[in-house]
Amino acid sequence: MPYPHLLAPLTLGSLRLPNHVVMLPMGTEMGTHEGLFTEREIAYYTARAAGGVGLVMTGIAAVSQDYEQINPGLCRVDTDDAIPGLTALAESIHAVGGRVSLQLTAGLGRNINVVDPDRAPISASDNPHYANPDVLCRPLEVEEIRTLVRRFGEAAARAAAAGIDAIDIHGHTGYIVDQFLTPAWNRRTDEYGGSVENRCRFAVEVIQAIKAAAPGLPVSFRLSVDHKFPGGRTTEESQRIAVILAEAGLDFILADDGSYEAMDYVFPPYYLGDGCMVPAAKALKEVVDIPVVACGNLDPDTAEKVLAAGDADIAGVGRGLIADPQWCAKLAEGRREDIRPCIRCNAMCVGNAFFALPLGCAVNAQVGFERERVLTPVETPRHVVVVGGGPAGLEAARVAGERGHRVDLYERDTRLGGVLRPAATPDFKKELHAMIGWWERQIARLPVTVHLGHEIAADSPELADADEIILATGSRPLVPASIPGIDGPNVVGVIDAHEGAPLGQRVVVAGGGLSGADLALELAQGGRDVTVVEAADEIARDLILINRMTLLRDLATAGVRLLTGHTVVAVDADGVQLRTADGEDVRVAADTVVTAFGVLPETTLADQLKAAGRTVRTVGDCVTPAKVGEAINAGYLAGAEV
C-alpha cells in the first residue's frame, strides 16, 4: 500500500475510522439565516464522507446567544430547533458509511464580525475589539462563564441525540475560548485568570461538561500552538496548555497556528508551502499521549511523510477535500494522480466566507452544488470544438468529454495551460502547475482530442462541422505604446520573464498586480535586485487579504523595493523614469524592465465568428480577465451546458 500510514484504520475513542485523515472544520455559509443546516450543506458534507475521509468535521456551531449576538447565518445549536437538521446531517453521512463531528463555539468575542451597538462584545478581559479598537469588550462575569459551560453541555446533548459521532471544541485563532487561554487577552485576577491552570479552567470545564452530557462521544480541541504575532501565545505555553486539556479528558487534539493578527496562518496560502504548521503538531506530540492532528497545506505525499516521521498521528485536510471530495477514495484505489489539486488560492472558499457567501472552489465548480451540478451522460453526443487550452478551455473540454460529447481542443501553443503555465513557474505555485497535469490526465481518458500548435481562424475548416463552439482564447498583454522606450531591447513582458527570458541583475517590474508581484518575489528570492512600480497606492490590491499579508511580508523579507503611487514615464537603456502623484520625477536604474501592466480580453476570433453568424460560447479571460477560479468555473458551466 503506497500510503500505509494515511490509509491504515484508526480508533478515536469509541470511533473506528477507515483511515488517518480527518476533514478539518471549515465554515460553509450554506445554512439558513437562522443558522440551521440545509439540504445544500448536508449534501456538501455527505459528498466528502462518501469520498472516504475518516471523519467529517463541520464548521463552527454556536452554543449560546446569551451574551453575544451571533452573526446571521452562523450555524447554531443553542435550541432544540437545531436537532432536525443535525439528525438529517448525521443520517446522511452514516448512510454513505461516514462519521461526523460537530465543532462547537461559545462565540467570537473580540473577533465577532458585527458589533451590536446595544451591548458590548464579550471577552476574557476588557480587550479592544479586533476590527474596532475603540470598542472595548466586556469581561465575562464568573456566573456568565458557568452559563456558557452549561450551554456547551446542552449543545453536546443535542448533538448526541441527533446521532452526531464526536464533538470538537473551537479553541483557536483568538476566538473566545482562546482568549481565556492566552495572557495577551486574559488579565483576570479570579479563578479564570493568572496561572496557566486558571486560564485553562474555562476550557477544562467545557470538556468536562461535554463528556458528562454526551457520554461515549469522542471530544477534540483545536488549539493555536503559535499565534504568530508579538505578544501572542508561544509554543512553550501551548505545550503546557495541551497537557492540561489532555488530562481533562480529550480524545485527540488538533494543532495549528495563527490568529486574527496573523490570519494567513489560519488559512495558509501557497506562499507558506507544504506542511507549514506541522511544527505545531510535532510540538504537541512531544508532551501529550493522545492523538495529534497536523494541518496546514497537506497534500497526500506530505501528509504520509508527516505521519511516517511520527510528527503527528492524523492528517487534517481542509481545502484539499473541498477541491476533491474523493481525496481518500482515490488514494485507496491507487489513483493519486487523479486527485484534483487544491491551488491554495483562498479565493472562493475563504474569500466567499469573508463576504458571507456560500463556500465555493476555484478548481471544483461542483462545491456547494453537489445535488445540482451532477454530470450525466448525454443521450445524443455532439461534436464540440474548444479553442484555447488555458484553464477555461481545459475545464470546458473535460466536462463536455465527461458527458460523452466528442471534443476537439485546439491550442495555438505547443503546450497546454495558457496563462497558468508561466504563472506557475515559482515553486510556491507548484500546485497551480499541477492542475495542468491533472487536466492532461483527465482528458486523456475521455473522447477529447488535443491539437497543439494549431491556431484557429474564423474560416478554419475545423469549425465547419462543429455543433458547439466554445472559445477560451484568453487575453493579450496591455503595453502602453505612449511610454517612450517601452519597446526597447531591455524590456521584457511578464509572461516571457516567467518563462525564462534573459534578465539582468537589476530588474524593475512595471505593474504591481498579482502577476508582477509574484514575479518580483520569485526573482528576489533568486538573488536579483528588484523594484516594483505601481501607479495605485497598493501592491496586489486584487489579491485576497489573507494571501496578500503573506505576499507583502515575503516581499519585504526578500528585499523587494515597492514604489506605489508612481507612474512609468519613460524607459531607456539604463532604467526607468517615474513620476509620483505629486509630480516629482524619480529615476530607477535597471538592467531589465518587465512590463506587467495587465491584460485585455482577446476577442478577435469571437467577433469574427459572430459577425459571420456563428453561435459561440465565450469563457474565461476573453470575456473579462479575472482570476483563475472564475475561468475554471465558467469553463465547467460551458461544458455542462452543451
Image (cartoon, grey):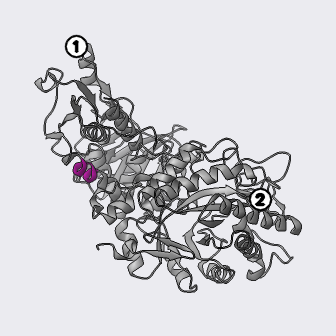
- Lateral position of residue 612 relative to residue 150, left or right: left
Q: Nearer the viewer, residue 147 or 618?
A: 147
Residue holding disc 2: 128
Residue 566: horizontal and vertical position, in percent?
47, 42
Q: Quadrant of the C terminus?
A: top left
Please say if the residues under marks 2 and 1 sit with CB atoms less than 8 Å apart: no
The amino acid beneath tag 2 is Pro
The amino acid beneath tag 1 is Ala
Q: Quadrant of the N terminus?
A: bottom left
Residue holding disc 1: 612
Helix, strand or loop at label 1? It is loop
- Lateral position of residue 568 relative to residue 128, left or right: left
| Residue 440 forms part of the magenta stretch | yes
> Which residues, given as a range, are shown in magenta?
436-442
Residue visible at 57% across and 53% down? Answer: 89
**Mark 2 crowdedness (10 Å alpha carbons): few <14, some 14-19, many ≥20:** some
**Number of marks in picture:** 2
- Is residue 449 positioned above or below 304 on the image? above
Quadrant of the rendered image containing residue 67:
bottom right
- Name the dominant secondary structure of the magenta segment: helix
- Lateral position of residue 149 relative to residue 576, left or right: right
Residue 446: horizontal and vertical position, in percent?
21, 44
Q: Is residue 523 visible?
A: no
Residue visible at 20% across and 48% down? Answer: 445
